[in-house]
Image (tube, grey):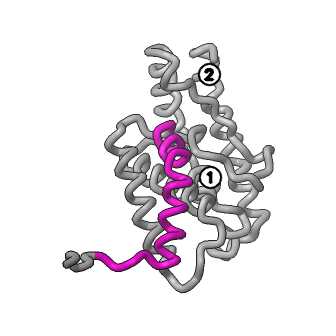
Amino acid sequence: MEPPATSQPMTDRDSEITATVVRERTRLVNFIRRRIRDQDDAEDILQEVFHEFVQAYRLPAPIEQASAWLFRAARNRIVDRFRKKKEQPLADIEPDDDADSEYRLDLALPSQEAGPEAIYARTLLLKALQEALDELPAEQRDVFIAHELEGRSFKDLAAQSGVALNTLLARKRYAVLHLRARLQPVYDELDI
């Protein structure tokens, strides 16, 4: 006599979820670990992303591009984690592909793997960046963070806020100009 079955057979959706997780896991782990030092935090983020993916995948509306969805969710969780820690790792977050280069800060942070001097320089730059962000008017700071950190498009920001697209672009431009001017002395001092 065979033992009774304890689990349901996998549905097509469950098979698709499993295949996507198996296919994307290594790339996603590497993406998160390049941005999060603490391995436990990185693993927590990975689990949160996969949990969100399973929940979202089971909704009636299908996820069109699972890989893009996973990386966007991971980036959002990373940003949330840094916000809680009051750090803003701008260079570590993948840029928005449709962003005009004129409106980008292009903050170059030394790699954490480059040794103690690089870690020190990185810490100074992040501190100076946080101070410079705090100096911005709220409208400029909010647009900068939404576009640079959250990866939101100007079109989406305009639709959600009701603010004209050109106004949002101008606010982002002023923020970038201020941040560049404010951070340049730090770069010069560190000789980066």
- Helix, strand or loop at mark 1: helix
Reading the image, the residue beneath label 2 is 187
Magenta stretch, residue numbers: 7-34
Q: Residue at x 52, y 77 (%)?
A: 12
- Among the 4 quarters of the image, the one containing residue 16: bottom right
Is residue 105 rendered to the left or right of residue 44? right
**Magenta span contains residue 62:** no
Marks 1/2: CA–CA distance? 21 Å
Residue 42 visible here = yes
- Among the 4 quarters of the image, the one containing residue 182: top right
Reading the image, the residue beneath label 1 is 144
Q: Nearer the viewer, residue 31 or 189?
A: 31
Numbered mark located on residue 158 in the image:
none
Q: Residue at x 54, y 85 (%)?
A: 60
Q: Residue at x 73, y 49 (%)?
A: 173
- Which badge, 1 or 2, comes first in the chain's sequence? 1
Q: Nearer the viewer, residue 107 or 187?
A: 107
Q: How far across and down, in percent of the image, does residue 99 sit? A: 75, 52
Q: How far across and down, in percent of the image, does residue 132 sit? A: 54, 39
